[in-house]
Image (spheres, rainbow, N blue to C red):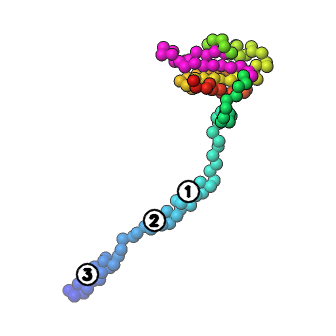
Amino acid sequence: MQQLGEAKLSLMATRIRERKPPTLSMAPMIDCVFLLLIFFMVSTTFAPMPGIRVQLPPPGEPSKDKPKGLVVKIDNPTVSDKDGTMLLNGAVVQFDEMFSLLLNAPEEQKTMLIIQSQRDVLHEQIVRVMDTAKDAGIDKIGFAITARE
């Protein structure tokens, strides 16, 4: 009887030793992830970012012709002021009066606004000038630079 009990124990011990823990194969899961990644890459469309189209002049000699239209020249800001001085066709102008001046400008001049700013002018000021021009009905905006001395 004791031999029978020992035989049962040895049989159970071999079954326990033979039993392997279950393993999880990662290869099918990695394949699924790559398939999903490829699917989303192929099916995704990217919308173009809205922005401002700027047509830069070709490199070379600057044009000697005086630009047609309104010209806003923005000087570098002073230490005490964050905005630079603005000149609309040679006359000093402030933001609060610029809209009415652009709106009441002659039609042949309202075809285009040329912004000529110096190096240290904040982009905020340039964008405000562009927004004011758009509100006044000027659709074409150009940028001009001055030659360094």
What whole-number distance in Å separates the C-alpha atoms at marks 3 and 1?
Answer: 52 Å
Where is residue 10 shown, x and y percent of the image?
26, 82
Report the residue marked by disc 3. Answer: 9
**Side (left or right) of 88 relative to 4:** right
Q: Is residue 23 magenta?
A: no
Q: Residue furthest left?
A: 2
Q: Is residue 68 magenta?
A: yes
Identify residue type, mark 2.
Met
**Side (left or right) of 58 relative to 9:** right
What whole-number distance in Å separates the C-alpha atoms at marks 1 and 2?
Answer: 17 Å
- Judged by depth in the image, the label closer to the viewer, 1 or 2, is 1
Residues rendered magenta in the picture? 67-88
- N-terminal-most mark, 3 or 2: 3
Q: Where on the picture, by quarter, is residue 52?
A: top right
Q: Count neighbours of disc 3 (C-alpha within 10 A) and say few if under 14, some if 14 to 19, many if 20 or more.
A: few
Report the residue marked by disc 2. Answer: 26
Are circles 3 and 2 on residues that touch, CB within 8 Å?
no
